[in-house]
Amino acid sequence: MTDVDPRDDDYRWQDTAISAGLDRLVHVLDAPPADLVERVQFAIALENLDVEVARWERAGSFAGVRGDRPGTVTFTVDHLTVMVSFTPTGGRHRIDGWLVPPGQHTVEVRVSDHDSTTTQADDGGRFVLADVPAGTTQILVHLESVHGEPSRTIVTPTLML
Amino acid sequence: MSELRTTETSPPWEGLEGTDRHAACLVAARAGDRQALNILVAELSPVVWHVARGNGLDRPTAEDVVQTVWLALLRHLDRLQEPRALVGWLVVTTRHEAQRSWRANRNQVPLSAELAEQLPTESWLPEDEAVRVDRDKRLWAAFSRLTHRCQELLRLTVFNGRADYRAVAESLAMPRGSIGPTRGRCLDSLRAQLDSEGGSR
């Protein structure tokens, strides 16, 4: 890795002012958030790694729900939409959710440094978790098996609640 | 697996660097070694982050995309034919996710890969307080007007340092000999932007 290809020799490398500026931009001004690695490591610390990722849809008025504000977030994957709303209840949260299309799937909420909370959606796809601790939160939907097929698991990126 | 390992046995990636190290971690991760997976996340998340940012995503969306890419890798652990191609897979997947986010969040016609490379991004400024120095603002504004391809390349080459050109070339799928000249042209553009701003040097 240490060999130098002559094609790389380039006077522009001598431009230390620009190089220092770029270095500052990448490592200081736009460095990744300090807790990003930790959040990813939490997000992937799953028992079963054969998961499908639901993407966070930020379009619309609920875009960018962050921090301690209550709000509604929508995650989608090809065949499932997960809508969740969070209501703070004195340092903890009530989670109201809705799966579309509906199904009596098992919904698991992981919060870092806490045990998972699990519930089952009703036949309309609705679920409620009345008392969830605050923290880095991830939602898993374990799809109910149909016709005895092995069920799949949907996971979301983490939210900070 | 990993808990059965005795203290005398060093992990297979120990002492390795760069692509060799990450390939060894990937092989171990496939066998169920969570520590190896965590090392990959710790060492390669900055690359994923800078590709996401270099492709025009704002910081919150880039954070989501970094997570999405790593979660997507879980299913692909066994499908990656060549462990040494991991960084390349991460870069390509991140670009793909970045384009998808553009579409979803901005309600725009999807950008073709070619157009996306040529299109200067708007100023996706980091938090205002982070760019409080005037010189930083000028640098940021100039950098933001570069093409996605230039932003990506400059971010990754600063990040990796000169000795890792080969790894950068592999991850960007560029011919190795074209990295230096392309980077040079990107630096020329950046310098021209800075000069037209009234100079910052």
Image (spheres, coloured by chain):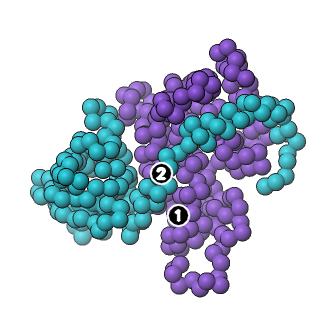
Query: Quadrant of the rendered structure where residue A58 is?
Result: top left
Chain identifier for the cyan-coloured part of the image: A
Q: Distance between the residues labelled 2 and 1?
A: 12 Å
Which residue appears at 88% of the width and 42% of the height? A6
- For the C terminus of chain B, the quadrant is top right
Q: Where is residue B15 in the image (x, y as percent from the top left)?
A: 72, 69
Which residue corresponds to the image point at 30% horizontal and 50% vertical from the top-left?
A161
Type of amino acid under label 2: Leu
Judging by the rendered image, the residue that carries numbered circle 2 is A36
Vertically, is B101 above or below A84? Answer: above
Locate residue B93 relative to residue A127 in the image: left or right: right
Amino acid type assigned to the residue bearing label 1 in the image: Asn
Q: How many labels does the image show?
A: 2
Q: Position of residue A86 (x, y in %)?
A: 22, 48
Q: Is residue B73 visible?
A: yes
Q: Which of B80 and B37 is in front in this view?
A: B37
Chain letter of the residue carrying label 1: B
Residue neighbourhood size for the residue with mark 1, other residues' Cα within 10 Å, grouped as few (<14), some (14–19), many (≥20): many
Rendered image quadrant of residue B18: bottom right
Q: Which chain is purple?
A: B
Q: Are marks 2 and 1 on the same chain?
A: no
Residue B95 appears in the rendering: no
Judged from this view, the residue extending furthest toward the right is A6
- The label shown at residue B38 is 1
Say above or below: B125 vs A130: above
